[in-house]
């Protein structure tokens, strides 16, 4: 649930990462387009390791490095104070601490001291990139007005059901500030606007390319596809052990309740980082062999990694699976009535068990939805109705249970002493329909956005290479 909330922008993790309009636009489009289109794009783009085209990835062989390396003097790049001057612009320790506070908030405040130090270095790298993006935008006369930033900040505040003033106070309580969020907003808007001016006009997608994707999508009808998230970490032979160890720490943090999208936005070096690492719907054949083998072994909700890939390591998260352009029973919409009973805090175990058994017997013998109110009254149960529940949005155990029910039947009683017990009564079902696939315009837009993302990564890499960065 935390992961889903973070993507939607309502989880605290959404504060710390990529909250500008471009990310919101991609997230909104993702539900409608990426759900089917990405699976057909294998020859057009590689959804995994999208940090750059393969021809742009530097090869260690080209550097003519000696097999035996002797270091003269001590030079550990990871031992330094987390401050820097980027082309004359200062990144202070306060800037880093306030941004780090948002990451800690995203993980419920449970971040070990060793992890905090590692996160500080990552935050510094992100702030350097953000500074370079803003500087490059200004160099090309791309300006973001204060009004635009305040409007975006107000939208973030509304996501938290707060006014901007209340949001300011909330951030101060978390040892952060509105200044940190607004800086991110400025960076996102400036970079997005710069890309629209300098890259997007030169990205073209032909009708033939779009039709080829549609043909491949139709040809793959019925094959299994996966909704996958990826965190990609680049590595060299010299630092691969360290990168693999970092990947394992990230997996550990996510398993302890951290948000996968939040960690993807913070750590992933793929172009999908801005959308929480979401690769969309992909078939195993679209992935490198090592990732394809791993994803086929996963069940929904599981993580895999670190997986060695060309140039680095990947962490995968499987959020869903289905068959291409085939009606999925889990897309059926249900009309449900929920009956719930709460136990008094001091109720004896034997009494609670007897109450649950009586409730279960009454619901089994209920005889359809028309008797729900009558039985609920007799059992002292509360009734809640929902007319449009998609099966796939329910917990996995309930999905299987409800798919086997006929209209009028109820699930077995489930729950706990602390949370109470309940049943769901199936009062109607609209069967799932086979997906028709994305439109040509949607496919064209997605291919264009992917190519813009790849060129943007190369653009940023060039800015890093040419920057004058002094660490203090």
Image (cartoon, rainbow, N blue to C red):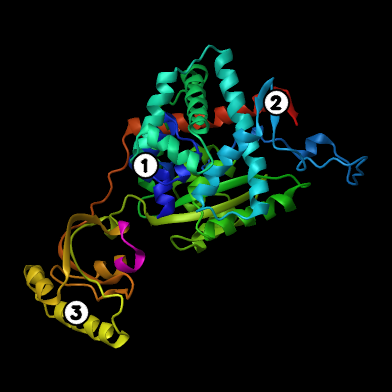
- Residue 29 in view in this figure: no
Query: Residue at coordinates 66% horizontally, 25% vertically from top-left?
Result: 90
N-terminal of the pair, mark 3 or mark 1, is 1
For residue 182, which numbered disc appears in the image? none
- Left or right of residue 404: residue 375: left
N-terminal of the pair, mark 2 or mark 3, is 2
Is the magenta region chiefly helix, strand or loop? helix
N-terminal of the pair, mark 1 or mark 2, is 2
- Left or right of residue 250: residue 391: left
Does the residue at mark 2 contact the one at mark 3 (Cβ under 8 Å)?
no
Mark 3 vs mark 1, CA separation in Å: 38 Å
- Left or right of residue 176: residue 218: left
Q: Nearer the viewer, residue 326 or 406?
A: 406
Q: Quadrant of the C terminus?
A: top right
Q: Give the foreground label among 3 and 1.
A: 1
Query: Residue at coordinates 30% horizontally, 75% vertically from top-left?
Result: 345
The residue carrying mark 2 is: 85
The residue carrying mark 1 is: 160
Image: 287 above or below 91: below
Query: Residue at coordinates 17% horizontally, 83% vertically from top-left?
Result: 361
């Amino acid at each position: 649930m935390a992961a889903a909330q973070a993507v939607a922008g309502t989880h605290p993790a959404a504060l710390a990462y990529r909250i500008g309009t471009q990310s919101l636009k991609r997230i909104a489009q993702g539900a409608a387009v990426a759900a089917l289109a990405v699976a057909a794009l294998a020859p057009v783009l590689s959804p995994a390791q999208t940090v750059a085209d393969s021809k742009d990835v530097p090869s260690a062989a080209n550097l003519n490095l000696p097999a035996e390396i002797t270091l003269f003097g001590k030079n550990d790049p990871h031992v330094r104070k987390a401050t820097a001057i980027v082309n004359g612009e200062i990144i202070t320790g306060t800037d880093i601490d306030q941004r780090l506070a948002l990451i800690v908030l995203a993980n419920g405040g449970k971040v070990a001291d060793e992890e905090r130090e590692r996160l500080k270095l990552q935050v510094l790298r992100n702030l350097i990139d953000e500074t370079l993006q803003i500087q490059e935008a200004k160099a090309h006369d791309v300006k973001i007005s204060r009004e635009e930033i305040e409007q975006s900040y107000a939208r973030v505040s509304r996501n938290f059901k707060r006014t901007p003033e209340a949001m300011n106070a909330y951030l101060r309580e978390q040892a952060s500030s509105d200044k940190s969020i607004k800086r991110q907003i400025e960076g996102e808007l400036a970079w997005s606007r710069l890309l629209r001016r300098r890259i997007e006009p030169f990205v073209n997608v032909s009708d033939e390319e779009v039709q080829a994707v549609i043909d491949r999508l139709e040809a793959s009808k019925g094959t299994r596809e996966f909704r996958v998230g990826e965190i990609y970490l680049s590595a060299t032979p010299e630092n691969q052990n360290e990168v693999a160890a970092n990947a394992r720490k990230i997996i550990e943090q996510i398993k302890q309740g951290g948000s996968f999208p939040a960690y993807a936005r913070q750590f992933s070096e793929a172009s999908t980082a801005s959308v929480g690492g979401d690769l969309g719907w992909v078939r195993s054949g679209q992935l490198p062999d090592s990732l394809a083998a791993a994803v086929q072994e996963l069940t929904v909700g599981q993580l895999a990694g670190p997986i060695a890939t060309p140039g680095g390591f990947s962490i995968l998260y499987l959020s869903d699976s289905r068959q291409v352009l085939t009606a999925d029973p889990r897309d059926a919409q249900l009309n449900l009535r929920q009956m719930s009973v709460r136990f008094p805090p001091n109720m004896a175990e034997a009494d609670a068990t007897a109450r649950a058994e009586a409730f279960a017997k009454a619901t089994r013998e209920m005889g359809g939805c028309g008797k729900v109110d009558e039985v609920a009254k007799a059992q002292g149960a509360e009734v809640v109705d929902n007319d449009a529940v998609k099966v796939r949005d329910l917990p996995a155990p309930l999905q299987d249970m409800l798919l086997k029910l006929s209209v009028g039947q109820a699930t077995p009683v489930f729950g706990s002493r602390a949370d109470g017990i309940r049943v769901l009564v199936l009062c109607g079902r609209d069967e799932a329909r086979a997906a028709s696939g994305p439109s040509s315009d949607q496919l064209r837009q997605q291919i264009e956005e992917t190519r813009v993302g790849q060129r943007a990564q190369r653009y940023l890499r060039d800015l890093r290479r040419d920057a004058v960065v002094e660490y203090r």
